[in-house]
Amino acid sequence: LSVPMARCITQWNGCGAILMALKDWYLDSTDFASKAVKVLVLVTGAVPIAKQFIVELGGLRTLLKVSEGGPIDVVQRKRLDYRLQSNVVGLLHNLIGGVDYSIGKEVAAEECLDLVIQALKSFPDDKYTQKRGIRYLLKVGRMQDSQVTMMLQKKQVGILFVQALDRFRNTNPGVKEMAQEALLWYATS
């Protein structure tokens, strides 16, 4: 997705249209939901103001609902859950970065934290999910909000950082460095 295309999507309320489509059709097609969330990941990566639009339009509630999935067979659910959950983690990662505190607080809600933590546990070998999920948790932790910090400690996210560090120590320097940085933050918070 090019930056000009992402700008057009944002300018013409494409984020709102995608969120409406997700809300209405996610039960019919988890594959559609996964692809729609991926477009939102790409748009928010290219056009920062899109983050605010998504949060203000109730996109977090939609994402949480979509990530629950719908009625499909178990084999297909596992494959699509991976794609959908990794894209939702990527979008939450994008949403937490560079937004004002009130929006950041919404993106750091316990339901969002739980979704990211569950994705990290469910897909421990996926470098995209691990790197984006750990970075999301680190950004949330650095918000200087004592309630959020206490929630992260209560949920023992440090264990996830250690597991990622161990798993990717020799195979992926990007995830390894992110896990080290997150672990250092966690140990000193």
Image (spheres, rainbow, N blue to C red):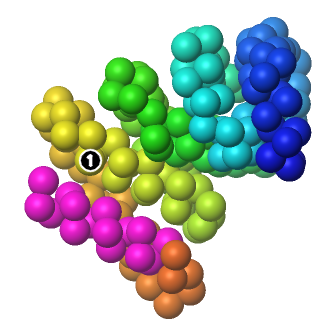
Q: Which residue is rendered at x = 74% and y = 39% of the image?
A: 43
Task: Tell me the residue at 17%/30% (across/down).
Answer: 147
Q: Residue 25 versus residue 3: which sits nearer the camera?
A: 3
Q: Is residue 41 among the parts visible in the rendering?
A: no
x and y, in percent, of residue 116 in the image: 48, 42
Which residue is at the front of the view, 70 or 74?
70
Write down the region rendered in magenta. Answer: 175-189
Asked if 141 appears above or below 174 in the picture, the reply is: above
Whether residue 51 appears in this view of the structure is yes
Residue at horizontal 52%, vertical 62%? 131
Residue 140: percent from left, percent from top = 34, 42
Question: Which percent across, then down, holds residue 175?
Answer: 50, 72
Residue 156 to residue 20: above or below? below
For residue 27, side relative to residue 156 (left or right): right
Left/right placement of residue 44 relative to residue 156 reads right
- Give amino acid for label 1: Arg
Residue wearing tag 1: 142
**Other residues around mark 1 within 10 Å, as few (<14) / some (14–19) / many (≥20):** some
Q: Secondary structure at mark 1?
A: loop
Q: How many marks?
A: 1
Residue 95 in the image, given as x and y percentages of width and height = 53, 36
Answer with left or right where residue 174 lies relative to residue 28. left
Viewer-proximal residue among 105 and 77 = 105
Q: Does residue 180 show up magenta in the picture?
A: yes
Q: Is residue 104 left or right of residue 70?
A: left
As displayed, is residue 118 above or below residue 110?
Answer: below
Q: Quadrant of residue 89?
A: top right
Location of the C terminus (image quadrant)? bottom left
Residue 81 is a magenta residue: no
Q: Residue at x 27, y 46 (%)?
A: 141
